Structures are given as C-alpha cells and as structure tokens.
Image (tube, rainbow, N blue to C red):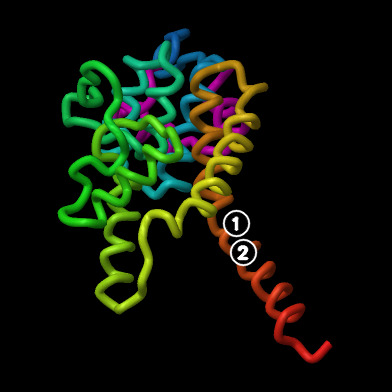
Amino acid sequence: MRISELSRRSGVSIPTIKYYLRDGLLPAGRPTAANQAEYDEDHVRRLRLIRSLIGVRGLSVSATKDVLAAVDEQQGDVHLLLGLVLGALPVERSGRPPRRDGAAEPAGAGAAAGDAAEDVAALTAEMGWKTSPNPPAAQVVAETLETMRALGVDYDWRSLIPYAELADRAARLDLDQLGDAGDPLQQAERAVLLTVLLEPALLALRRLAQEHHSALRFGNG
C-alpha cells in the first residue's frame, strides 16, 4: 500500500508516519521509485502499537523506541512481550529486558523496605502468583500499605486477599480477550488498550457499586 493508505488504515497522519520512519520507530517500506515506497500489514500493526504506546500508555517517543526494540527481539515470547508493552518489565537502554535467570521470584521481593514488602511477598505467595523480580506494581502495593499504616489504618496482606482474587479474575478476562489476535503485535496493542483504557472504567464501576450497596445498607429507601 502507499503511504496515504497506510495513514488511513492505521489512523496515523502522513507527517507523523514520516517522522517515525526518520526516527527509526517504523521500518522503511519497499522502494518503488524515487521518494516512493510500498508498505504492508506489518507496518499497519506496528503503527497501531506505536499509537497505543504513545497515545494511550503515555510513553515518550524515546521510551517507545526502546520498548519496540525489545519487542522486535521478543516476538516469539508473548508473555515477555506483554510484560514489556504493559510496563511490568523494565527495558534497558540496549532495548533488551533484564535477563531472567531460573525461576521467577515472588512479586514484591525487594520492592520496598520493611513489613510492607514482606506483606506483598506473602500475598503473592498465598495467591500462587509468579512474576518477574521486583515488578513496579508490587512496589505500588507495598507503598500503599506503608502509607495506610502511617495513617493509623490497621491493614495487612490478608485484608487484600479478596481484592487479589477479584484482580485474578479480571486478569483472566483480560487475557481471554487476546485470544483472537493471532499476531504478537496485535496482541500487544490490544493488551495496552484493554489495560490502560479499561482501568478508569473499572474504578468507576467500583464507585457505582459502592453507591448501590451504600443505598441498600444505609439509605432511606
């Protein structure tokens, strides 16, 4: 396809496509004449993933370039690819994710100092979850527990188990929706959209459910 068709199919403007080509985010097309080239479905999928990483996940162009470099090397490993595009795994400046030596460590190992980090490790062990070492999400959980304790709220990892069970069900639903996207780049794009775009809606649904149950328990009918 010509660049105009590539723009229409991907939803990315022609000037932006040319910028991505110059900056190395998008591979060059097949030359057909002076200053002309043809593009294929791989370019469409790549552009959609770029748009998701920059426009939806909010990554910078430089960070997106690093993620794409790692994705190019890891397309045969869908699990690792999803970790890279969703931010569960950091990307080194070389474009490669950190090495995974042996079995995965429990989430939260070294994520934060003190009891909160130990709580996260205990929670993930209880749930039977296997993750990469020190994932950013585990650090968020540990910091939240530390803040709650600092404010005098008696809350530990056992209190989070019902929420972890809900999260486990939600994660299964997320991954079930990747099933009909056969290409790794399509799976990566859909994973970003499902994760990032759905998160505000999931929080909003929680607020609606809280309002409903508050009305049932404490309302005046």
Report if residue 221 lies within the magenta region.
no
At which x and y percent is residue 208? 68, 69
Q: Nearer the viewer, residue 111 or 186?
A: 111
Please state if 143 lies on the left or on the right of 175 as rendered: left
Return the residue at label 1.
202
- Residue at position x 23%, y 23% in the image: 96
Residue 177 in view: yes
Q: Is residue 20 magenta?
A: yes
Q: Residues within 10 Å of mark 2 (few under 14, many from 20)?
A: few
Q: Position of residue 201 (x, y in %)?
A: 61, 58
Q: Which residues are magenta?
A: 1-28
- Asked if disc 2 and disc 1 are in contact, CB closer than 8 Å, the reply is yes
Identified at 68% across, 79% down, the residue is 214
Q: Image check: 183 left or right of 106?
A: right
- Taking the spot 32% from the left edge, 15% from the top edge, the residue there is 73
User: Mark 2 falls on what kind of element?
Assistant: helix
Q: Residue at x 38, y 19 (%)?
A: 27
Q: Which residue is mark 2?
A: 206
Q: Is residue 211 above or below residue 157?
A: below
Q: Residues within 10 Å of mark 1 (few under 14, many from 20)?
A: few
When asked about the image quadrant of residue 80, the answer is top left
Closer to the camera in the image, 51 or 56: 56
Amino acid type indicated by mark 2: Arg
Residue ranking furthest to the bottom: 220
**Can you say whether 196 is above or below 35 in the image?**
below
Q: Secondary structure at mark 1?
A: helix
Q: Residue furthest right?
A: 221
